[in-house]
Image (cartoon, rainbow, N blue to C red):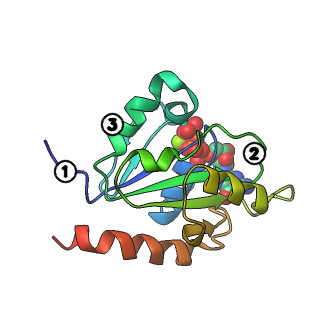
Amino acid sequence: MASNKKRVALIGKIGSGKTTLMQRLGEDELKYSKTQMVTYYDEFIDTPGEFIELPFFSRQAINITMDAGLVILVNSCVDPQNAVPPNFVHTYNIPSIGVITKTDLGECNIKRSRNLLIYAGINPKHIYVVSSYTGEGISELEAAIHHFMEPHRNK
Ligand SMILES: Nc1nc2c(ncn2[C@@H]2O[C@H](COP(=O)(O)OP(=O)(O)OP(=O)(O)O)[C@@H](O)[C@H]2O)c(=O)[nH]1
Ligand SMILES: [Mg+2]
């Protein structure tokens, strides 16, 4: 089976901003398109939010992301509801980081998002605060991704 070690897996609630973040990181045009199925790109695995929101799918979400090089758990700072079980990211044995998205929006609550990411098992030192729309925080996030992915991508 082909390895996914060179790919970054994106997980998070429906509409949290995973696909848009991937587009921003890839310097692609930001174009909304609901993720309907797990989608493999050269550098990413994009998952539909249903994978983490619906218990029926969550095992599948783990199966698909467990051999990636890095997992990014995305949380929208305008979404008051959690859908990620406690310590979810510890289920598998690969590095994980948290990303808080949509900081350009007025009703953004970064503290709440941080707490939800920490509840999901993300190390507080590895939380990045970004807006895919304005590009705020993207270069810091890119540096973090580079740090974790460099060993896999140079093989
Ligand atoms: N204002 C603002 N809107 C954003 C940002 N990122 C994403 N959005 C919007 O949020 C909505 C959902 O974004 P997606 O990237 O499709 O979310 P997703 O996590 O891929 O959602 P699923 O594919 O359903 O799991 C879209 O309308 C995006 O344009 C951001 O940084 N700022
Ligand atoms: Mg999507």
What secondary structure is marked by label 1?
loop
Residue 141 — which label? none
Q: Which residue is mark 1?
A: 3
- Choose top left, top right, bottom left or bottom right for residue 151: bottom left
Examine the rendered structure and indicate whether residue 17 appears above or below residue 147.
above
* Mark nearer the N terminus (3 vs 2): 3
Residue 80 lies left or right of residue 59; in this view the side is: right
* Mark nearer the N terminus (3 vs 1): 1
Give me the C-alpha separation between circle 3 and circle 1. Answer: 13 Å
Q: Amino acid at mark 1?
A: Ser
Give me the C-alpha separation between circle 1 and circle 2. Answer: 34 Å
* Mark nearer the N terminus (1 vs 2): 1
Examine the rendered structure and indicate whether residue 49 appears above or below residue 114.
above
Residue 79 — which label? 2
Residue 111 lies left or right of residue 72; in this view the side is: right
Q: Which residue is mark 3?
A: 63
Residue occupying the point 37% across, 70% down: 148
Q: Amino acid at mark 3?
A: Asn
